[in-house]
Image (tube, grey):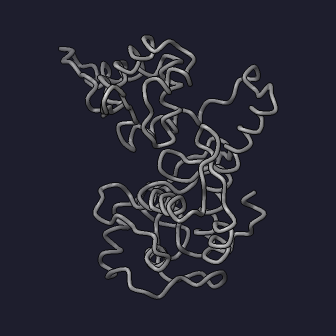
Amino acid sequence: MLGDVSITDTGNDRDARAPGLAALAGLLADETRAVCLLALLDGRAWTAGELARHAGVAPSTLSEHLGKLVAGGLLAEERQGRHRYVRLADTRVAQLVEDLAVQVAPHPAHRPRTLRAASAGSAMARGRTCYDHLAGRLGIAVTDALTAHGLLSTVSEPGGRTDGAEAGPAASGPAAPTSSAGSSAAAASSASRERATGFLLTEAGLRWFEGSGIALDRATRRPLGRACLDWTERRPHLAGAAGAALCRHALDAGWCVRIGSERAVKVTAAGERALAELLGIEAGTLR
């Protein structure tokens, strides 16, 4: 991935990472390549033809750009028959692209000029996937509800202190399920891997995920909870392994469905009922 960008020996006291950083910046410093990377934040694999049409360039031009992104470790590719599929190389690339994108305010000249474009933008702001987790007002609503019920804490200091208790449900709101999610030692181990990531899944949160039937990958080296700054809401939503598990479950269980050709998702009636029951989220906030 990012480590694949070549770093050469400069022969002096300059930071040895400088050539690699410059090479990475060069990969991102092209509008067509940026369009491709942003499109692939939907977490799916696209064909080269689909990306060419999306970017509005000739297939031959797009192929050249994809070659550079693959060689630079930002994209992974696979071939099935005559089709070439590409996707973001991993979650670190997705995080890099999203973190950079949130720094860029839309240019006035790029504001929606048609009702269709405005509707698409509204749908993206209402709810979307951010690589493999939920974003937009939907992602913020879920994150706020998890925090309010003591299932998620925010890390306020690099040393790991949080603004909420790490065990036990909140005094109000839906009670966390009482089924076991492993020993306190295991929870502490998980917590230690989440320091300074912005969010910390509490022991009550671990039980809630298990009791809700949402499978967490506890073996991953990826933090269970991570804060990802939402580019439309300008507030952090839940990412990491927990965010990915929740998003995957929401799509698999039919709580959300993808709409349009971008990353927008819509909460279904079944999703409104489930989120109201499990997290006390009012349906009106999801529309």
Q: Locate residue 35: give its quadrant.
A: top right
Vertical position of residue 93 compared to residue 7: above or below: below
Residue 39 percent location from the top left of the image: 53, 33
Describe residue 68's horizontal placement relative to residue 49 as left or right: left
- Residue at (38, 85) in percent of width and height: 180
- Residue at (57, 54) in percent of width and height: 237
Residue 166 percent location from the top left of the image: 47, 75
Residue 215 percent location from the top left of the image: 40, 68
- Residue at (21, 18) in percent of width and height: 8
Describe residue 79's horizontal placement relative to residue 161 as left or right: left
Q: Quadrant of the C terminus?
A: bottom right
- Residue at (59, 37) in percent of width and height: 102
Residue at the extreme bottom of the image, as rendered: 178
Residue at the extreme front of the image, as rendered: 81
Vertical position of residue 77 compared to residue 239: above or below: above
Vertical position of residue 236 compared to residue 165: above or below: above
Q: Nearer the viewer, residue 159 or 53?
A: 53
Q: Nearer the viewer, residue 173 or 117?
A: 117
Q: Quadrant of the N terminus?
A: top left
Residue 270 percent location from the top left of the image: 65, 68
